Image (cartoon, rainbow, N blue to C red):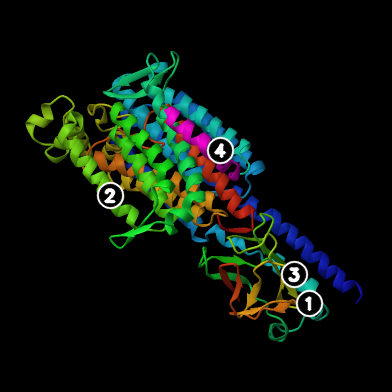
């Protein structure tokens, strides 16, 4: 009888230890299973592309993709050591999106007759590998996201610096009318993509400290309490610089992205819907003025509102690309032409800006909805991480980073399907482009780090 | 490769993509954030502080609940984080401005180490740790460790919370 309380206590301790060890392992095992599933779907897509387009399999490219799978699994193993409680769904979702992108780019290479190092798919794979390695480094180095808050003004400088970089003579390069690239001789890079992460870090870090004065202090006018200029100053300065740079670099999409990020974080931090009214009004006025006076914006609007007009269709930079993309969607119909069986190569820049149109043509409405659902699930996880965040900085950062991805998908897919005017942004994870892949994988690494903290740290912070 | 095989593979691939989507949704179903409250910790807490449960492990649940059924969570009902729920997992929760506190409240009226909630014989007891502006249970300032019944407002600084089952 004297033994029984002891043995009872022992058994509960064992049980407790098992619980401690079991829960994270369960998460990681789920992640591993889903990553392997994602790789199976990716390999199937690549096999079907080659079967559909050339009638025979192309083992080397499937082999290369499995190599990529190995790198994703390396990230998974890194998480087993440094982020055991991280969200198990984000990595598989992103792996599949990236894989589908590679499959579609490979398909466009076949129709363009590109092979070896000329092929976009090869470069995309190399960039994916680099991006995942960078993500692994981020998740290993950044052990505590609160450290990032400390350097908020450094992030501001980094963000603005990266935005300005393409304007520097000699290294700045103009491609398709937008001066967004930096040419370092051996590699062309789009620094603005990394800049968006730096600015999200700055906005989140700054708003955490300024939140109270933004929402409480201020004078009342028109039934609304307006914040003091003093509190808003740094944000408006950064935002103004970003806008100016973007006007000179002629990039509508990125300016819309920064504006949206700024508005959403203001709203989330202060909880006041007035930011949407003010921001929407500002943006509407800006867009209207720009469409009247800036030539390239005017052209974009005409191509959007009156795409099927022969004049717009034939114009340089007109609606030709947009209309070809729409024809692609139309020929895909509900179930698509099948991978490798359509003609997605007709659309100019099908592998980057119009990858959704290519996917729509070959996978149809059903396939496009599957891809959009994957994006939706990714965003849902990100917002969940934000809601469950253990501190205000983590919450704002998770929402900000997730929103960057969500808005980017909306701007690109909306543009391609003629919901909004076309702007030059890359589809996250799908489109060909190294800078965008690296930036988005860094976002994935940061979200995984934040989700690990949610489960890991039980304490709750209230206030700033 | 015959047309028919490609046709079947084409639909098979669309199906496979959706199977993946539903696999993710299925994993989401038991939203993994719900493992937040660890049952194991809870039982451990009960056993160390409730001798009756230890000596009478086979008592029917009704009997144990009548002697002790401590609150399982803390809900903030007013203040900067209104609506926040914190599961009470261990037998102790410190409240204050310090980053080491279990519940960090940072406002003008909260002290660095403000108060401590502790599970004592199956009841949650709050003890003020010499705070400047005081801790109030049901609008009464706390000077000695005071039991906190469920659904009773406790205010610390400008934050008011309640304990709930």
Q: Please rate how many residues cluster around mark 3, counting C-alpha atoms within 10 Å: few if below 14, some from 14 to 19, many from 20.
A: some
Q: CA distance from mark 1 to mark 4?
A: 48 Å
Which residue is at a point 37% across and 58% down the rendered structure image?
A: A219
Residues in magenta, as a range: A145-162
Vertical comparison of B41 with B56: above or below: above
Name the secondary structure under disc 4: loop
Q: Are marks 1 and 4 in contact (CB under 8 Å)?
A: no
Q: Nearer the viewer, residue A4 or A206?
A: A206
Q: Are marks 2 and 1 on the same chain?
A: no
Q: Nearer the viewer, residue A378 or B148?
A: B148
Tell me the quarter of the picture where residue A117 sits: top left
> Chain under label 1?
B
Image mark for residue A280? 2
Which residue is at a point 49% across and 45% down the rendered structure image?
A: A206
> Chain under label 2?
A
- Closer mark to the observer between disc 4 and disc 3: 4
Is A354 on the left or on the right of A204, as rendered?
left
Q: CA distance from mark 1 to mark 3?
A: 8 Å
Is A450 on the left or on the right of B71, as rendered?
left
Q: Which residue is mark 3?
A: B45
> Chain under label 3?
B
Quarter in which the N terminus of chain A is drawn: bottom right
Quarter in which the C terminus of chain A is drawn: bottom right
Q: Are marks 2 and 3 on the same chain?
A: no
Residue A422 visible in the picture: yes
Q: Which residue is mark 4?
A: A151
- Point out the tag, 2 or 4, that comes first from the N-terminus: 4
Image mark for residue B50? 1
Q: Nearer the viewer, residue A445 or A373?
A: A445
Tell me the quarter of the picture where residue A259 sits: top left
Tell me the quarter of the picture where residue A257 sits: top left
């Amino acid at each position: 009888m004297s033994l029984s309380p002891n043995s009872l206590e022992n058994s509960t301790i064992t049980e407790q230890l098992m619980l401690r060890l079991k829960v994270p392992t369960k998460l990681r095992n789920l992640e591993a299973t889903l990553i392997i599933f994602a790789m199976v779907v990716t390999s199937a897509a690549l096999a079907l592309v080659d079967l559909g387009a050339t009638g025979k399999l192309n083992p080397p490219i499937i082999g290369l993709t499995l190599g990529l799978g190995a790198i994703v699994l390396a990230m998974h193993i890194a998480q087993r050591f440094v982020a055991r409680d991280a969200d198990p769904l984000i990595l598989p979702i992103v792996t599949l999106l990236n894989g589908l992108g590679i499959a579609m780019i490979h398909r466009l290479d076949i129709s363009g007759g590109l092979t070896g190092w000329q092929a976009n798919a090869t470069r995309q794979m190399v960039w994916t590998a680099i991006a995942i390695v960078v993500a692994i480094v981020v998740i290993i180095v950044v052990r505590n996201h609160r450290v990032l808050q400390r350097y908020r003004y450094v992030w501001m400088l980094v963000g603005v610096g990266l935005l300005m970089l393409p304007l520097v003579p000699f290294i700045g390069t103009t491609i398709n009318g937008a001066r967004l690239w930096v040419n370092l001789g051996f590699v062309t890079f789009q620094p603005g993509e990394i800049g968006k992460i730096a600015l999200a870090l700055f906005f989140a870090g700054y708003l955490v400290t300024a939140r109270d004065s933004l929402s409480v202090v201020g004078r009342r006018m028109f039934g609304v309490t307006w914040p003091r200029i003093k509190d808003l100053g740094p944000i408006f300065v950064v935002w103004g610089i970003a806008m100016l740079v973007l006007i000179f670099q002629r990039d509508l999409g990125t300016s819309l992205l920064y504006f949206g990020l700024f508005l959403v974080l203001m709203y989330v931090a202060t909880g006041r819907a007035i930011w949407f009214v003010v921001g929407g009004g500002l943006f509407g006025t800006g867009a209207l003025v720009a469409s009247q006076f800036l030539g390239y914006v005017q052209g974009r609007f005409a191509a959007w509102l009156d795409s099927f007009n022969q004049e717009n269709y034939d114009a340089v930079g007109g609606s030709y690309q947009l209309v070809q993309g729409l024809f692609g969607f139309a020929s895909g119909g509900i179930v698509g032409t099948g991978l490798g069986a359509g003609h997605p190569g007709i659309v100019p820049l099908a592998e980057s800006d119009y990858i959704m149109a290519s996917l729509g043509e070959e996978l149809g409405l059903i396939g496009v909805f599957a891809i959009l659902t994957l994006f939706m699930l990714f965003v849902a996880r990100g917002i969940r991480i934000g809601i469950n965040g253990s501190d205000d900085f983590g919450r704002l950062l998770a929402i900000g980073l997730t929103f960057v991805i969500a808005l980017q998908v909306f701007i690109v897919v909306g543009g391609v399907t003629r919901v909004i005017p076309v702007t030059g942004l890359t589809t996250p994870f799908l489109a060909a482009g190294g800078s965008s892949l690296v930036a988005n994988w860094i976002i994935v690494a940061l979200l995984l780090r934040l989700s690990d903290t949610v489960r890991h740290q039980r304490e709750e912070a209230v206030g700033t | 490769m015959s047309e028919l095989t490609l046709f079947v593979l084409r639909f098979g691939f669309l199906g496979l993509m959706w199977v993946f989507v539903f696999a993710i949704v299925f994993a989401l179903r038991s939203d993994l954030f719900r493992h937040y409250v660890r049952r194991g910790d809870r039982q451990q807490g009960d056993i160390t502080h409730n001798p009756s449960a230890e000596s009478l492990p086979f008592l029917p649940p009704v009997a144990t609940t009548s002697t002790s059924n401590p609150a399982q969570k803390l809900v903030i009902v007013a203040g900067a984080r209104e609506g926040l729920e914190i599961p009470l997992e261990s037998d102790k929760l410190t409240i204050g401005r310090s980053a080491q506190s279990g519940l960090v409240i940072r406002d003008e009226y909260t002290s660095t180490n403000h108060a401590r909630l502790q599970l004592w014989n199956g009841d949650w007891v709050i003890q003020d740790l010499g705070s400047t502006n005081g801790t109030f249970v049901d609008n009464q300032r706390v000077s000695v460790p005071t039991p906190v019944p469920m659904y009773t407002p406790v205010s610390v600084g400008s934050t008011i919370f309640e304990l709930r089952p």
